Image (cartoon, grey):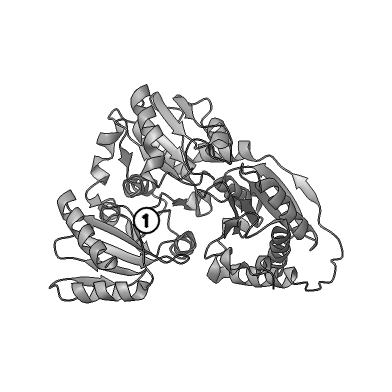
Amino acid sequence: MSCLSDLSSIIKAYDVRGLVPEQWDEDVARAIGAAFAEFVHAETGASAVVTAHDMRDSSVPLSRAFAEGVLSRGVDVVEAGLGSTDMLYFAAGSLGMPGAMFTASHNPAQYNGIKLCRAGAAPIGQDSGLVQIRERSEQLLDGATVPGPERLGTVSSRDLVAEYAGYLRGLVDLSGIRPLKVVVDAGNGMGGFTVPVVLAGLPLDVVPMYFELDGSFPNHEANPLDPANLVDLQAGVREHGADIGLAFDGDADRCFIVDERGEPVSPSAITGLVAVRELAKGTGTTIIHNLITSRAVPEIVREHGGSPVRTRVGHSFIKEEMARTDAVFGGEHSAHYYFRDFWRADTGMLAAMHVLAALGEQSRPLSELTEAYERYVASGEINSTVTDQAGRVAAVRETYGRVEGVAFDELDGLTVSLPDGAWFNLRASNTEPLLRLNVEAPDAARMAGLRDEVLEMVRA
């Protein structure tokens, strides 16, 4: 088996991701396309697949090779062309087709990947089809013979960005808000393509930063989760006296918010704010949050008559729980926001529109508006390279097991809740020798002390 026919290194828990061409190339894309077509056709009788791609140099050739694989199985391909990941989810939802988005999201330029979904934007993950697709792709790369279909599939093109924008604007009406100045950092990613269409003609003075589509990311990585990549936006908001700043990642499915002072607003606060708006519609009471979000989120949900449901980290878990509970909204600490009105898929653009609406429907600055949702102090996610992950977690548990009044939870990694309201979660990466630490406490000093205490044990 060649290195390119062992796909376990690139087909991960939620998607395909790897270096091009070292880890995967057009031959691999073609095999994955054929395997995906076989899978969705066998599962639901799907006769067509919709694709979209980001601005990376490798995205067009990889997506076309994937399409060749799909066509070889007698399944049609609708090419939506350039788009964000949430535009692909819109396509899979509105067209009722399985979908494939070619992007490596926030990863550096030499990477690319595929995010796969069922019709209606339903997730495909490690436990829901991705393993079978990987195994079948490996068989095809190793020369498995396949009887030809009765007919080859056909290709058509469809420009969906205007329909996508119209759908979002139908969910959040921004036409009547007060005028706002908005700085948007697209990081040379797909936000530079979608933002001008979605926000056109609204009472918004948009100041664009890095809207040029460039998969080499010449200005900074398109990963706003790293504070270093927010610096330009923060400076831009202050320089222009803006009301708000928005930062999108490479495939524009996540959005990070900066207030009028240039200070980041935590994704947990955004989760709380959007949850309150969704609950106010009166169409449902369940709100999903992963276990890394602030404890303020479930408190706020309950205060507004909602029912918070806690899940593991990861979009497939969130989407499955949303389907099970008919939740109206879900949020993650990583700025993924999920909406029942958007096929339970994540869309940073829709979350941003909710924040713009909340800001523009009243007169206070964003920093005051979000104060009610920022109740505690969080560390953010801190990674430590650790060879014996299980041993380090066990040592931490043993230490805190000797502290009176401590509660343990193992829904996802180890969550330790302390009597004074402080807590932390320690969980292993699925793909790397890392332990990820998140800490939250009632004040900054307590958070810093607990953070340092746990890190010392983890890195001992």
In the rendered image, which quarter contains the C terminus? bottom left
Taking the spot 74% from the left edge, 54% from the top edge, the residue there is: 65
Q: Position of residue 354 (x, y in %)?
A: 41, 40
Taking the spot 35% from the left edge, 69% from the top edge, the residue there is: 413
Q: Position of residue 56 (x, y in %)?
A: 62, 44
Q: Which residue is mark 1?
A: 285
| Quadrant of the rendered image containing residue 29 | bottom right
Taking the spot 33% from the left edge, 44% from the top edge, the residue there is: 273
Q: Position of residue 236 (x, y in %)?
A: 39, 28
| Quadrant of the rendered image containing residue 322 | bottom left
Q: Is residue 243 visible?
A: no
Nearer to me, 142 or 254: 142
From what the image shows, is residue 191 above or below residue 327? above
Lateral position of residue 3 relative to residue 415, left or right: right
From what the image shows, is residue 1 above or below residue 89? below
Q: Is residue 18 visible?
A: yes
Instruction: Judge the density around disc 1: few (<14), some (14-19), many (≥20) Cα neighbours within 10 Å.
Output: many
Q: Which three-letter amino acid code belongs to the residue tagged 1?
A: Thr
Nearer to me, 356 or 245: 245
Q: Secondary structure at mark 1?
A: loop
